[in-house]
Image: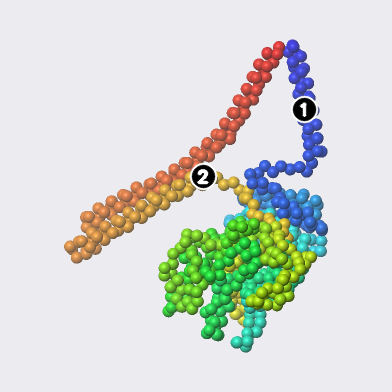
């Protein structure tokens, strides 16, 4: 084959390749339309199955308005990057909803109508650092009947719950009616009349707060059936419920209802201050028949005591004393991956019990609140007639075990009434000691199990009492409540989460899109440890020098003259020289850290800018040489 023929063949080949490329592009646009591939490490742009189910159930148009100050954030690349993440997630929502969701991206420039609109929606303008103008970064939504819902400011710190927050606003707009919460309480949580004091009683702060966000419907202790429009049962200090009420709760949860349950081995809130015979008794509560069927174990005989999280209370003569039965948890004891506890900072509990799950149970117990390793269990009797909380520390030994104080139970559970509803005799008197009658025939609607239970359990009723989380003040005749712990937020989060549909509850925390420089972080940690060690050595030598100077001053025989002796002057000069040397070491540590980071950056630049293109060039040249050799061999 001549050289001219080879060129002609090459040109024809290039033409064919170009035609194939164009045809492939056209075919992909037609055949692969709508197909997407998420190549991010944690599938950040892949919508979860729960969100897809929720978006697919929308029956009305929903408009979402993303307000983001573009010009004012030009010097904030991190915030702009997160804004892109939010924008792309909303676009994916709109795509999955098949047009039910319409996304509007709005830049509320200062003094514009868009800024006025953002303010009308109730979005918050935030001033960040040295910016001269405030910025908007919030989301507002409307449905077809004019209902509104907003996220005032999309905080990058809440990125792991971005999908949940966006799905929640869509769910609220698609379901604008207030969720109905059924309150079954053995404690006096609502306003009422106290016959002992002959005065009206104020409702608990948590009851007032919940009534502002939900429709709270109080249920009787002997409730026989749960209304169909109730989505969540809020059970507080149930006490000795009859078989009829237990069966109603059992069937409600097996039908897909959710529940928030507060039980307690020693509920101090129910201690009477007017009757000396009962003032220190405390009262336990549990749902033993249901817990046993679910595989849940709740210890009524012991209280969790925690030496690390013990709260200080007023002791004798006003001196503060640590009470290891009153626990103040910080965020290290709260589950950061559950929406109920993710953003909370402190939770207070009083004489709480703990939960565990049996090995035979098919359900999953996800801890929400846990004690520290410096905790143990103590018999409830030790908290009765307790006059000095400091006495609890006598002989206290931590078990190096963390106890589950609150948890989410989810998965497969069985009925506590496998043979059907209780008989009339059992319902009338559950504690009758005579031989039980035959069970009633199983009703057509009786359920024996479910695979999708979702129940939140809390081992403390005092958790809800005002004294552990809120302070009331009378301000010109009005009661003002100031929260000093997040107990109320926990309850509202739990009711809000449980009142959503199953798809919304199933959305979990997602990974963050930010990719930290782990190698640089490791270098910083090593340098900081070395810096601290050197600094501590300096402080130790300073203390040693001061002690040496004091000893020299005390040993002087000239009556403690204010003039320094030669030995003292020499000791001070020696320390000053040592101080200069150690400071040089500290600067050297910092310089070495900066140098290590620069060297790491240089190596990465060499690899990305030089090595990778060089390798690609070598591969390309090798391919050219290989082709030429094949051509020569063929000719």
**Residue 464 can be seen in this image:** no
**Residue designated by label 1:** 18
N-terminal-most mark, 1 or 2: 1
Q: Position of residue 511 (x, y in %)?
A: 63, 50
Q: Nearer the viewer, residue 633 or 546?
A: 633
Q: Where is residue 429, by image quadrant?
A: bottom right
Residue 520: which numbered mark, if any?
2
**Residue 31 can be seen in this image:** yes
Q: Secondary structure at mark 2?
A: helix
Disc 1 packing (10 Å; few <14; some 14–19; many ≥20): few
Mark 1 and mark 2 residues within 8 Å of each other at the beta carbon: no
Q: Position of residue 448 (x, y in %)?
A: 72, 62
Q: Where is residue 604, by image quadrant?
A: top right
Query: How much space separates mark 1 and mark 2, taking CA atoms?
Result: 46 Å
- The quadrant in which the C terminus is found is top right
Tell me: 394 left or right of 514.
left
Q: Nearer the viewer, residue 2 or 323?
A: 323
């Amino acid at each position: 084959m001549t050289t001219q023929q080879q060129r002609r063949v090459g040109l024809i080949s290039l033409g064919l390749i170009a035609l194939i490329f164009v045809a492939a592009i056209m075919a992909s646009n037609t055949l692969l339309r709508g197909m997407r591939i998420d190549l991010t490490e944690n599938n950040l742009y892949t919508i979860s199955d729960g969100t897809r189910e929720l978006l697919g159930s929308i029956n009305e148009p929903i408009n979402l308005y993303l307000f983001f100050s573009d010009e004012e954030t030009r010097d904030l690349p991190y915030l702009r990057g997160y804004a892109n993440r939010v924008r792309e997630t909303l676009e994916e929502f709109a795509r999955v909803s098949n047009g039910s969701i319409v996304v509007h991206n709005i830049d509320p420039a200062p003094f514009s109508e868009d800024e006025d609109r953002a303010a009308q929606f109730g979005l918050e303008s935030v001033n960040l650092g040295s910016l001269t103008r405030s910025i908007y970064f919030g989301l507002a939504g409307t449905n077809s009947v004019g209902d509104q819902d907003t996220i005032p400011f999309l905080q990058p710190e809440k990125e792991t719950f971005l999908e949940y927050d966006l799905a929640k606003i869509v769910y609220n707009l698609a379901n604008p009616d207030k969720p109905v919460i059924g309150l079954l309480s053995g404690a006096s949580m609502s306003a009422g009349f106290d016959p002992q004091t002959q005065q009206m009683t104020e409702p608990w702060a948590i009851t007032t707060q919940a009534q502002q966000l939900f429709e709270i419907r109080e249920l009787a202790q002997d409730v026989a059936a749960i209304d169909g429009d109730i989505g969540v049962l809020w059970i507080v200090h149930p006490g000795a419920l009859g078989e009829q009420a237990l069966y109603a709760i059992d069937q409600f949860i097996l039908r897909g209802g959710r529940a928030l349950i507060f039980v307690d081995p020693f509920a101090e809130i129910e201690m009477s201050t007017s009757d000396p015979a009962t003032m220190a008794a405390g009262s336990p509560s549990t749902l033993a028949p249901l817990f046993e069927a679910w595989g849940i174990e709740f210890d009524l005989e012991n209280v969790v005591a925690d030496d690390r999280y013990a709260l200080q209370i007023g002791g004798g003569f006003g001196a503060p004393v640590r009470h290891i039965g009153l626990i103040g948890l910080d965020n290290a004891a709260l589950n950061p991956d559950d929406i109920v506890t993710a953003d909370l900072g402190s939770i207070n509990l009083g004489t709480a019990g703990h939960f565990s799950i049996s090995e035979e149970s098919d359900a999953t117990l996800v801890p929400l609140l846990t004690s520290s390793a410096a905790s143990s269990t103590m018999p409830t009797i030790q908290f009765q007639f307790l006059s000095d909380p400091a006495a609890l520390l006598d002989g206290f030994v931590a078990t190096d075990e963390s106890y589950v104080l609150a948890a989410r139970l989810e998965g497969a559970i069985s009925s506590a009434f496998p043979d059907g509803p209780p008989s009339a005799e059992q319902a009338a008197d559950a504690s009758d000691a005579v031989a039980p009658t035959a069970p009633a025939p199983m009703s057509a609607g009786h359920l024996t199990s479910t695979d999708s239970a979702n129940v939140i359990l809390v081992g403390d009723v005092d958790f809800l009492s005002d004294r552990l989380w809120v302070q009331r003040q009378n301000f010109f005749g009005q009661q003002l409540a100031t929260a000093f712990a997040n107990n109320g937020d926990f309850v509202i989060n739990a009711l809000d989460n449980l009142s959503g549909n199953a798809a919304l509850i199933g959305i979990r925390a997602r990974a963050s899109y930010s990719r930290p420089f782990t190698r640089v972080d490791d270098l910083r940690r090593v340098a900081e440890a070395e810096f601290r060690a050197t600094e501590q050595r300096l402080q130790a030598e300073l203390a040693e020098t001061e002690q040496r100077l004091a000893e020299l001053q005390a040993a002087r025989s000239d009556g403690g003259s204010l003039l320094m002796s030669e030995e003292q002057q020499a000791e001070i000069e020696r320390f000053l020289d040592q101080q200069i040397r150690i400071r040089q070491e500290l600067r050297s540590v910092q310089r070495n850290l900066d140098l290590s980071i620069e060297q790491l950056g240089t190596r990465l630049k060499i690899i990305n800018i030089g090595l990778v293109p060089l390798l690609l060039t070598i591969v390309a040249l090798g391919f050219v040489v290989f082709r030429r050799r094949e051509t020569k061999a063929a000719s």
